[in-house]
Amino acid sequence: DFKRSQIAYSDEVRNELLGDDGNSSEIQLIKLREERAHLLDNTERLERSSRRLEAGYQIAVETEQIGQDILENLSHDREKIQRARERLRETDANLGKSSRILTGMLRR
């Protein structure tokens, strides 16, 4: 019993000097668990952010495609309007000629 108490006492003194009491390993385990939980939370947050970025990128790509389609449509519409305007000018010129011819015929 005496030897056992000496060994136990020396272990206790050693642990006390080295700062390693019986609760230290439990405290370290708790800290490790907390750190692991914190890392898992950060990893999850990072994954959520990555998914949001990917979704935002997809929206940007779709928006760009829609913008290109709209610009193409506007270009086609502009060409149609320009052709129609040119036809109206030709028609106006032809009506002017016709009007002059009819006016000349009426004078005769």
Image (cartoon, grey):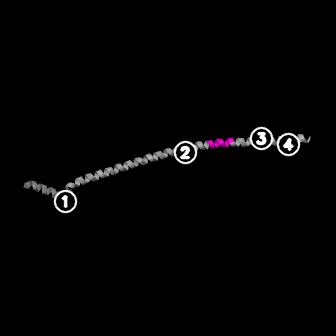
Residue stretch rendered in magenta on the structure: 73-80
Query: Which numbered mark, 2 or 4, is in the foreground of this view?
Result: 4
Where residue 23 sits in the image (x, y, percent)? 21, 55
At label 4, counting other C-alpha atoms closer than 10 Å, the crowd grade (few under 14, some 14-19, many 20 or more) is few
- Please rate how many residues cluster around mark 2, counting C-alpha atoms within 10 Å: few if below 14, some from 14 to 19, many from 20: few
* Residue type, label 4: Arg
**Is 89 on the left-hand or right-hand side of 42?**
right
**Comparing marks 4 and 1, which lies closer to the viewer?**
4
Q: How many marks?
A: 4
Quick one: label 2 or label 4, which is nearer the N terminus?
Answer: 2
Q: Which is more foreground, mark 1 or mark 2? A: 2
4 or 1: tag closer to the N-terminus: 1
Q: Residues within 10 Å of mark 3 (few under 14, many from 20)?
A: few
Residue underneath mark 1: 17
Helix, strand or loop at label 3? It is: helix
Residue that numbered label 2 is attached to: 64
Disc with the residue nearer the chain's start (3 vs 2): 2
**For residue 11, which quarter of the picture?**
bottom left
Q: Residue at x 28, y 53 (%)?
A: 31
Q: Is residue 102 magenta?
A: no
Rendered residue at 47%/45% (across/down): 55
Q: Which residue is at the far bottom? A: 17
Location of the C terminus by quadrant is: top right
Q: Which residue is mark 4?
A: 100
The earlier-in-sequence mark between 3 and 4 is: 3
